[in-house]
Amino acid sequence: MTSAAIPPQATSAVAMIRTLGLIAALCGFIIVSAYQGTYDAVRENKRIAVERAVFKVIPTARSIVEYVASPAGEIVKVGAGNAASAAGTAAAGGAGNNAVKFYAGYDKDGKLVGIAVEGVAKGYSDNVRILFAYDPAAQTISGFGVVTSRETPGIGDKIVTDKHFLANFPLDAKLTADLKKLANAIVTVKHGSKTQPWEIDAITGATITSRAVGRAINDAAQMLLPRIVPHLSALKEKP
């Protein structure tokens, strides 16, 4: 009794599938190895970029400390620039995914001079991610810088070059009497129509990007400031 012979075509197909599977596995291994090999460097570069941005928006700061604030108002100090540590500490403190990370800037004497926090909103081409500064003494948003943006060069990037747009700052960021929210939402208005200190005068031709800046600041400020303003005494001195 003889076994049936496997057709040459079937043998060829099996060999091809086996070869493709081996190549796919090898490619996957190379990709994962490259990712793991560069992860620490990428994370460190991001930390440095954010740190530089913090010093830019809080120019009087000489050192920074990273914190997370929970919805309950708990403020937890974390390792500087360590996002993973921040997330872990927040979870441990009961903050979960609603924790907000921020940076406190201190002068040479260890006194609080400003707070920086990231904000993000949809622009014309993609999300516009910014870092803005809150001045606790004046209760204002003193300025901002762009972290990432894919807006049209020469148009969308005017938010950091247009002198009239930058003259919108500082913005009023006072809270209501019960410290639950901003007394006045920060909004972007049509160019030339600004009448209030919490309004942002848009850039003609870059209105969408201008509005993205306003939304990013307002949304992040509405979430963070009610959590930290009642506890500023805990932040006034560098730990």
Image: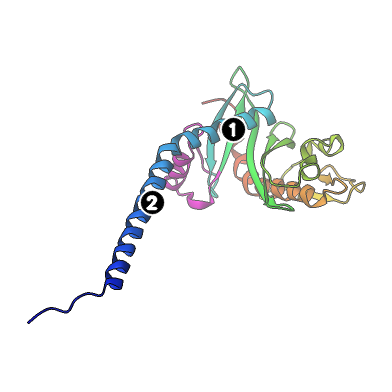
Could you tell me if residue 183 is visible in this image?
Answer: no
**Which residue is at a point 71% across and 31% down the rendered structure image?**
137
Secondary structure of residue under mark 1: helix
N-term-proximal mark, 2 vs 1? 2
Of the pair 7 and 60, the residue shown nearer to us: 7
Extreme front residue here?
8
Q: Quick one: 37 or 98, which is closer to the camera? A: 37
- Residue density around tag 2, few if under 14, some if 14–19, many if 20 or more, within 10 Å: few
Residue drawn at x 80%, y 35% as measured from the top left: 161
Image quadrant in which you'd find residue 158 = top right
Query: Which image quarter holds the N terminus?
Result: bottom left
Residue 105 location in percent, x, y?
61, 28
Q: Residue furthest top?
A: 109
Kindly indicate the quadrant of the structure image that contains residue 58: top right
Measured Cα–Cα span from mark 2 to mark 1: 30 Å
In the rendered image, which residue does mark 2 sit on?
28
Secondary-structure class at tag 2: helix
Residue 77 on image: x %, y %: 49, 35
- Provide the residue span drawn in magenta: 74-100
Whether residue 146 is visible to the viewer of this picture, yes or no, is yes
113 w.r.t. 84: above or below:
above
Q: Amino acid at mark 2?
A: Gly
Q: Nearer the viewer, residue 6 or 199?
A: 6
Amino acid found under the numbered disc labelled 1: Ala
28 or 22: nearer the eye? Answer: 22
Is 221 magenta? The answer is no
Residue 203, relative to residue 167: is it above or below?
A: below
* Residue at the left extreme, as displayed: 1
Is residue 98 magenta-colored?
yes
**Which residue is the extreme one toward the right?**
192
Coordinates of residue 30 in the picture (x, y in percent)? 38, 45
Question: Which residue in the protein does label 1 denote?
Answer: 49
